[in-house]
Image (tube, grey):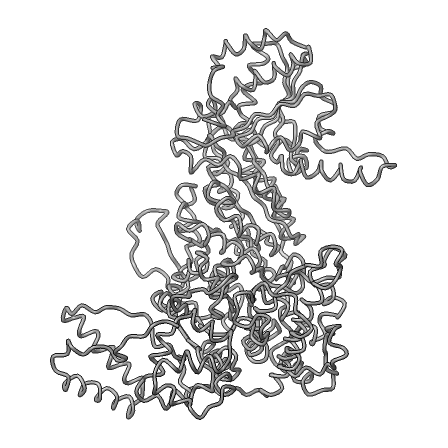
Amino acid sequence: MSAQPDNLFGSAANDADAQETREWIDAFSAVIQTEGRDRGHFLLEQLLEQARQEGIDMPFSATTAYLNTIEPEDEERCPGNLEVEERLRAYMRWNAMAMVVKANRLHPEDGGDLGGHISSFASLATMFGAGFNHFWHAENENHGGDCLYIQGHSSPGIYARAFLEGRISEEQLLNFRQEVEGKGLSSYPHPKLMPEFWQFPTVSMGLGPLMGIYQARFLKYLHARGIANTENRKVWVFCGDGEMDEVESLGAIGVAAREKLDNLIFVINCNLQRLDGPVRGNGKIIQELEGEFRGAGWNVIKLVWGSYWDPLLARDKDGILRKIMMETLDGDYQAMKANDGAFVRKHFFGQHPKALEMVAKMSDEDIWRLQRGGHDPQKVYAAYHKAVNHKGQPTVLLIKTVKGFGMGKAGEGRNIAHQAKKLSDDDIRTFRDRFNIPIPDEKLAEVPFYKPEEHTPEMQYLHERRKALGGYLPKRRVKADEQLKVPDLDAFKSVTDATAEGREISTTQAYVRFLTQLLRDKELGPRVVPILVDEARTFGMEGLFRQIGIYNPEGQKYTPQDRDQVSYYKEDVSGQILQEGINEAGGMSSWIAAATSYSTSNRIMVPFYIYYSMFGLQRVGDLVWAAGDMQARGFLLGGTSGRTTLNGEGLQHEDGHSHILAQTVPNCVSYDPTFAHEVAVIMQHGLKRMVEKQDNVFYYLTLLNENYPMPGLEAGTEEQIIKGMYLCKPGPKLTPRVQLLGSGTILRESLAAQDLLEKDWGVAANVWSCPSFNELARDGQDAERWNLLHPTDTPRVSFVASQLEKHTGPVVASTDYVKAYAEQIRPFIPKGRAYRVLGTDGFGRSDFRSRLREHFEVNRHYIVVASLKALSEEGTVPAAKVAEAIARYGIKTDKINPLFA
């Protein structure tokens, strides 16, 4: 146990007038006793403010005593039947345990180890019970429904409740973590895998807290803009105390306080353990988190001790027990809960004779029943009631529990608790006895599930409570009820038409034009959610500031410096833009909230989140994966994309691989368009899929800041653009011939190479725009799979092969991305045809575009050389021509490979 100071009450050596000090303390105590704590708090604040005004240095402490925030006499009494609730919790505990244990006893031939977690729900059961029985509203005609971010490792307990409710069958419980045949339950909360059940994916720890904050903020946004009434909805986010070490967990708590998100409640399960051991063995995680959240401006409610502690604390007139509570370290608290009452008597109360005297008449069993607050249903109810009725701030509940509560030696309070998934027969018997589960000894080896008859008081109570709260949770909406119409492609002629003579624009400008036109649509325009991370002027979007305003719940109290400008910085209570500052994780979380609004709020919203492409998928890739799991719908736009387009910015800004990352998310549809009309065709088609058809996909488009003339849409190519490849500029009727493929900015190098090949070498080239090598690869892989599984049927032909089979000659693909991007389609190039790929492998660097393209060997000259080399290998042109081209274009043959440079 941790050492204690010799002087329990500290030194008074620096007190110049002890009598005066005592008079001040007595006077303050008298005010509290006669006029209440609120009056005492007011006087203390006034004294502190006066001290600051007088220039007295005031050290700040954001923590309070290691006690419950709510005094026993101030607790709101739980209106429920606590005895019935306790029995229901016991059944859920048993079924959750049985589900995991049975899964890990099955199929020993496969290793018999499917994993799963018992200890997390064991510590959370009382907290979940209070929420489900008394606080958490389902969506119904009178309520939009609360949002529940369930701590991922506790999923067995949620399934156990749903089993009692009749929403999950015993067969499904028996198939926990066995999903391949479609009968099982997902290991953790996954909307993709259980689309009508789980609302949010949370087991990638840290993302739940971050996404929950922006979900609460988006509900406020919907209400402020008059799109949905969300004023009575709450967002509940359950986290573990160990999870709070994830930078995302605490990274946005200032946003929640600044925006006064009183619809947000964090419940942090402080069982003092993370996956391998103590969270803060040498400290106190509850105190640490209290300081973090209180300092950020949150309402903090601590629930540390259960009701059996109340009489002891009431007798603690000298503050001895309170001091022991404060000075005992978390590592010591864990050791106490891993032992017994005698151990607690010796090592906790034994720290001071008067503390030992307080428990002298208590048995060891009585001392063991001195529970932590998170296992006391009355105190949990009181804390929740206080939280839901607090106004003007987000609330965090710091609730102390025991990891593996009820598991005994199999894991209760022990470092092994998180990994416990296989219990012995003796452990199971102990569990049965502790929670009084009506299963006979002869059945214990089977670890059977237990479900009372429907007519029993427990089952009637279970259903009555959920009926009173509008229905069962968790529950997810798969499609929005509303139907919205997407404008036809003709509505975007300003984007699809060719630019006027002498005019040049970038694909970023094309996107802004598309967005501006969409905002004018009376039906869909109000549902557009532009999301920015402090780069509006970079992307030419500052014109939207005045047009639709920036959302701010407090409006604009100041006069902006640029008020006399047309595009001044306008903040508004009903503003449409979400401006996240320099905060990509926040921008992505806002995008997720908007992109899943069809499910969480029954409102179709269309988010457009634009950012530097380098600071997208590689920076917030875990959030993008979560968005895929949540079946998000919307547009992600990677601006200044490619490794050679951004003059002067260098390694950290130049993206050459985001499309490879995008390809890994199955429902992310990604494109690297070169021309404005491609941008318009892709985005209008994406709107059709996501808004009208409500397909569960989202789109990633890379955009350029490079200006050039736009050729305009050629009618009849729309479908090919969507599929990923079309012939944008045929070559002359000459031989030999090559096929040049490209995307993004490097397609223009292919167009320039087409001219050089004809003029300098008499070679004809067709130029193909390939807006998506990813979509081409997916199509080809799908065709290959079909052919593998249908060997006697007519083989399917990939789209790549169908496009190229009537055009002869080698194929050369060039992009501003790593070679792996275009390499994906190699298997689908017609047989016998050479395929060469140029790409920008290696680190980016600062310079002009032309020099960067020479450095990465993707410019027009390298495309010509690659084409001649491919022709020479098939015997169409002599190898000497390749050497001649290298000399003519001044290509340095001794240059270091850019991959290693």
Rendered location of residue 772, percent (x, y): 61, 36
Q: Please state which of residues 336 and 50 is positioned toward the viewer in this rendering.
A: 336
Q: Which image quadrant for residue 198?
A: bottom right
Say which quadrant the N terminus sits in.
Answer: bottom left
Percent coordinates x, y for residue 272 in the rendering? 46, 69
Residue lying farthest right?
Answer: 792
Nearest the viewer among 507 and 417 is 417
Residue 620: x percent and y percent?
50, 49
Residue 631 versus residue 306 in the image, above or below: above
Q: Is residue 308 above or below residue 768?
A: below
- Kindly indicate the quadrant of the structure image that contains residue 412: bottom right
Residue 475 in the image: state x and y as whole percent.
Answer: 64, 67
Specify whether 488 is left or right of 609: right
Q: Is 115 left, or right, of 284 in this rendering?
A: right
State how many labels appear: 0
What residue appears at the point 79 percent right and 40 percent down from the top-left corner?
Answer: 786
**Residue 267 visible to an observer of this rendering:** no
Left/right of residue 795 with respect to residue 200 in the rendered view:
right
Q: Quadrant of the C terminus?
A: top left
Name the residue at 36% across, 65% down: 296
